[in-house]
Amino acid sequence: MRAGILLLCALLFGATAAFPEETPETSALTRIAFGSCNREYRPQLLWKPILACQPQLWIWLGDIVYGRADVPGDLVRRYRSAKAQPDYQELRQRARVIGVWDDNDYGEKDGGAENAHKKESQEWILDFLDEPPASPRRAQAGIYAAYTFGPPGRQVKVILLDGHYHRGEPRELWSWITRTPEAESDILGDEQWAWLERELTDSSADIHLIGSGIQVLADEQPFEKWANFPRARRRLFDLLAKTRARNVILLSGDRHLGEISRAVDPRLPLPLYDITSSGMTHHAQSNILYDFKKEANRFRLGKNYPNFNFGLLEINWDGSPPVVTAQIRGVDNVLALEEKITLAPLPTTAP
């Protein structure tokens, strides 16, 4: 009976989790690290500086490994190797680890709904992430999820979007030729859109971190991005405006570089930031045809950082108003980029 109720909840509401140890007495999150694009067979240069930052939470933003779903055992073997890295094992002991995929751990380059092995890919990544057998993420179509951390008044909700399981065709290469097919295609699918609206509308969290495998704000670079799906991108912005969720910050990966973008939407009470961290074991290499350091991004703050990097958010809840310091850090824990994000004042508690 209980198992049936769990399954019904998963189908109706999607994956939403609050950690059982979270009580009003639990310390709020103050340090969150994140990253993407990790080839498990290359030198793992960033785990030690990540550990030195002492994050309470680590968020994978996709491309945890680079494999193919249509090659038997390939993704499983790569996940096993990634998980065996000694410094990553230490991180798993010290911090909570959550995550979502991008195309290379989905198992099909720039893949969407047509991936014939997507159900198996879902099981493999959830095994890697140690999702329990009864997790709602195992009962739904796609690995989107939401997690709530911390006590009321200092609460963070992390929303992870699955941009592949339901993604429509045709794919990006064709869009470069015609500029039309992807314009009408969806990314999330109807069930995930409905779930996302509920997560934003019904949320009492003070900060909402929305994780996406691909960039949301940047629209000038020629690679994968939400801007390749303008209808879906517009729908996302409309949903943020409609729900008016407090203090939304976007997190993204994929690009093999780090950068911080900011856009102003008059419908939103605060600017919208997209913190991109990508390239844990490999990074963007300029060539005679393309210079990543000169890549256009009208929303970028400062420069981009085409080098090994991870992202770090430090939350000062005691500020008036609170402040999130967003950083991109590199090898030897070098501080490459930083932006201080002033949040909306926390609601006052009635006496």
Image (spheres, rainbow, N blue to C red):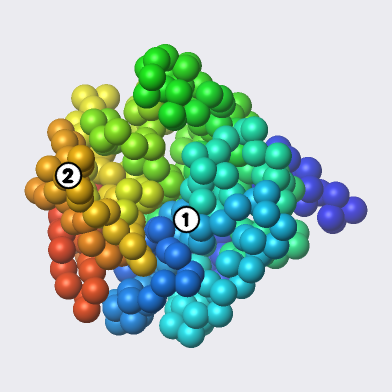
User: Any mark on residue 63, and which?
Assistant: 1
Q: Position of residue 126 (x, y in %)?
A: 64, 59
Q: Nearer the viewer, residue 67 or 267?
A: 67
At 49% across and 48% down in the image, what residue appears?
Answer: 102
Sequence order check, earlier mark of 1 and 2: 1
Q: Residue visible at 36% across and 67% down?
A: 281
Q: In the rendered image, which residue does mark 2 sit on?
A: 288
| Residue at 19%, 56% in the rendered image | 305
Residue 104: which disc?
none
Q: Quadrant of residue 317?
A: bottom left
Quick check: can you spot residue 231? no
**Three-letter amino acid code of the residue under disc 1:** Asp
Q: Are marks 1 and 2 in contact (CB under 8 Å)?
A: no
Left or right? Give the position of 263 relative to 120: left
Front residue of 154 and 126: 126
Q: Position of residue 100 (x, y in %)?
A: 52, 53
Residue at the farthest front position: 288
Label 2 crowding class (10 Å Cα cut-off): few <14, some 14-19, many 20+?
few
Q: Residue furthest left?
A: 302
Q: Residue at x 41, y 58 (%)?
A: 37
Cα distance between the residues tagged 1 and 2: 26 Å
Quadrant housing residue 337: bottom left
Q: In x, y percent, where is residue 115?
A: 65, 39
Q: Is residue 32 left or right of residue 64?
A: left
Judged from the image, the secondary structure of the residue bearing numbered disc 1 is loop
